[in-house]
Amino acid sequence: MRMKRGAWLLLVIWCAVVVGGGVVFSKNIFQMTNLDLYYLNTTRGYVENQTIARASYNKITFYLNHYLDNFFAGMDINYFFFGGHPREVPGGNNDFKINYWLIYLFLFGVYDQFLNRETRIVALYFITLLVVSWFSIDALWFLLVPFVYLTVLYPIRALWKK
Amino acid sequence: MEKVILALAIIMGIFFRVWQIDKIPAGLAMDEAAFGYNAWSIATNGHDEYGKFLPLSFRSFADFKLPAYGYLTVGVVKFFGPEVWQTRAISVVAGLVSCFLLYLIIKRLADKRLGIIASSIMLWSPWGVLFSRGAFEGNLGLFFLMLGAYGLVKFRDHPKYLYLTAVSFALANYSYITYKFVGFILLFVWLIAYRGVHKFSKSTLVSVFIFLIISAPAYLSLMGISGNNRIGSLLKLDPAQTGYPAVIQLTSSYLTYFSPRNLFFRSDPVRQRHFSDLPTFYPWMFVLWLAGVAVWFKTRKTELAKWIGIVLIVGPIPAAISQDPFATLRAIPMLPAHATLLALGAEKLLDAVRQKFVKRIVIATALVVMSISLYSALMVMKNGQAAEWNGGVEALAKKLIEYPDRTVFVDIPHDVYPNLALALRYRPEAMQKDNADFDLEKYYSDPVFPETIAFGWYKVGKTDRSKAAEVPGALLVVQPENTSASEPRERGWKNAFEINDPSGKPLFLVYELN
């Protein structure tokens, strides 16, 4: 897929906006509390071979885990439609970001995009998520919501065209 | 070179499933211990712990465990004794054979290479390794399901393979409650989906008949109290209770089984169902999954894609209607399909690499990374998750034997009694004698499980500590979280001994009460 220069520029500006949002509204993945450090050292202590322990549990794996925590939250449909309710997380609280009845349109939208080989919305969602994951998705989830709504609207737009 | 890497992958994969099987997980889950003890009991005189002769389901904690795992363990326990690895042996073998069956299925549906990749992924997956290392009846059920699925794919070659399917799916019904639904639905969905491929004949009807005949007692038991007890503990869809419309609950619950977050990052929240810091598949496999989904979608009309689709759609249905979020044990029928999806992605990505040595380096790196992750997770399970697996009960029993003829009040959850009985090698005949008061007429119908279980000198469960102190020479076993530091001093208890986990954290405190 070849992109025009203007599109590249828009993408760079969008990423800058996301990074700016992260800096202003959110903590980043590199923050480590004393409790985190204690957990890391305790877990490392359980592994009998200390070389493997250090390879498995260190600051890099800790940051990576934080990054992946954000990234995979953004890959979870339930995060937007049923986020954290007790069916998903034991004892979790209802945290609906988008009306849960829209899930069916969303699923159809994803399928429709797959069928039509439409990759723009998915690509933009991924790029935004990859940037947001450096910060905290719980603080910046609203930056991803437009793409979810675009997916919801995608099949409707196609129907409209017909 | 490829063969060396492949042999290494298989040997190491098997190694991680059997290594220190008696120590990792550190202890026995209550269900494992119940299977072990009842198997020992049946092996001794054909009666279970309550004195019921060859029961159709094990009453156990009034949860009426399905019989297949218990009965298959009887032989192992009979020859090798009632210890930890013997209790887990059937699950280990079932897990390994399931991987081989996946290879055979994929070889038949696609090709040998994809079969090897898929079965290797299943062999190495933390999902498969975890449930293979414990005495999980769901893992045995998966084996029967895979055997049945193998019969279905070979059905095209010879109609008689459908008999294998019918018997296997029926036996799966006696392994784990999930399969009472999955096997049935899979069989019919499969036959409908492949109506153009298979030639239906007399053997088709005979197979369905065999399936129904063998399964009938299993389905009928669902209508009794034993079945209701199990199903009642699973289904909770009442909107008044949960605050959400049932259809939304089901949708969200069903989708959790396809969420990359659950598959590649977050583990099953239930204790004894997860490795610490290791999800069902390794996080880096997400890349394979994405590629796999793309390939699957592109080839969705092929027989292999249909197989993956059917298993993925049907697999999580029983798990989705249960109240637990992302219940990996109930959703284990999905494991082979997810592994195949990952294999499709892996094959596609490997094909994209042209140089042979780069391919070898990629595969070798993947093996090293998986080995490090699995080794670390197993170590954490051994040394840090002992409390989750009733670890320390074996050591507790060894110490308690040093206090003969003393009444022991074990003030910990009552369902740990089979662990203690097994660790004490408390003879099944004696246990049956202790349970002589139980009315065997109500074996399958009494849903009540007492709060305290008494056998020999041991009383396990809720304890009135003041009354216990009145028993001469009594000992009290408590968990550190269930007593305060000042209680022993205030009540005048004497410290007898304590049992610690491998990291030195106390698991059980034992006091002499007078």
Image (cartoon, rainbow, N blue to C red):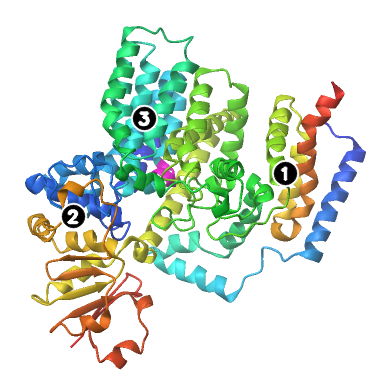
Say if A110 sits above or below A24 in the image: above
Say if B64 sits above or below B393 in the image: above
Q: Can residue B1 be seen in this view?
A: no
Residue B214: quadrant of the picture? top left
Q: What is the three-letter code of the residue carrying label 2?
A: Glu
At mark 3, the secondary structure is helix
Q: What is the three-letter code of the residue carrying label 1?
A: Phe
Query: Is B179 a magenta residue?
Result: no
- What residue would you read off at disc 1? A126
Q: What is the three-letter code of the residue carrying label 3?
A: Met
Stretch of the chain drawn in magenta = B124-128
Label 1 or label 3, whichever lies nearer to me, is: 3
At mark 1, the secondary structure is helix
Spatial CA distance of label 1 from label 3 is 36 Å
Spatial CA distance of label 2 from label 3 is 28 Å
Q: Which mark is residue B83?
A: 2
